[in-house]
Image: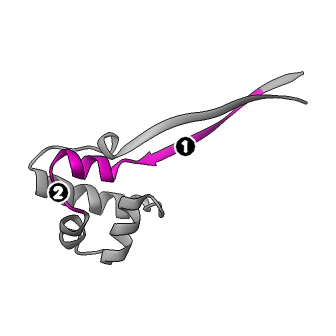
Amino acid sequence: LNTLYSKRVLKIRLKEVLEQYGLSAYRLAQSVKTLDEQTVFAYVRGSRTPSLNSLGEVLTALRELTGQPLTVSDILEYENHESYTRSI
């Protein structure tokens, strides 16, 4: 019996969103008052994954900075990688 497996990844798109609106990571970090600046920088670099609460704080700051009704789908991207078949 063969089973198809795939690696699913949620990608944080903060860097792309900041570039799209001409914003810096520093400006975002200054706007997210509940998180340490270095934490926000790590989210932007993709070296750290935010909790749901932190994601909400970042999204609120982005909405205020851009004046746009951004949603979670604007800053998260679902990717499907490395499909493979395994015999079981």
Residue located beneath label 1 in the image: 9
Left or right: 5 in relation to 1: left
Of residue 80 and residue 57, the one placed in the foreground of this image is: 80
Left or right: 18 in relation to 45: left
State the CA–CA distance, disc 1 to disc 2: 26 Å
Which label lies toward us, 1 or 2? Answer: 2
Mark 2 crowdedness (10 Å alpha carbons): few <14, some 14-19, many ≥20: some
Say what amino acid the circle numbered 1 marks: Val
On the image, the x and y values in percent for residue 78 come to 47, 37
- Specify which label sits upstream in the sequence, 1 or 2: 1
| The C terminus, quarter of image | top right
Q: In which quadrant of the rendered view does residue 28 lie?
A: bottom left
Task: Label 1, secondary structure: give it.
Answer: strand
| The N terminus, quarter of image | top right
User: Looking at the image, is 11 positioned above or below residue 4?
Assistant: below
On the image, the x and y values in percent for residue 84 come to 74, 29
**Is 16 part of what is drawn in magenta?**
yes
Task: Label 2, secondary structure: give it.
Answer: loop
Say what amino acid the circle numbered 2 marks: Leu
User: Looking at the image, is 63 positioned above or below residue 39?
Assistant: above
Of residue 60 and residue 42, the one placed in the foreground of this image is: 42
On the image, the x and y values in percent for residue 72 come to 32, 45
On the image, the x and y values in percent for residue 16 come to 30, 47
Residue located beneath label 2 in the image: 23
Residue at the location (22% across, 49% down)?
Answer: 19
Q: In which quadrant of the rendered view does residue 30 lie?
A: bottom left
Residue at the location (40% across, 67% down)?
Answer: 42
Residue at the location (38% across, 72% down)?
Answer: 39
Of residue 41 and residue 36, the one placed in the foreground of this image is: 41
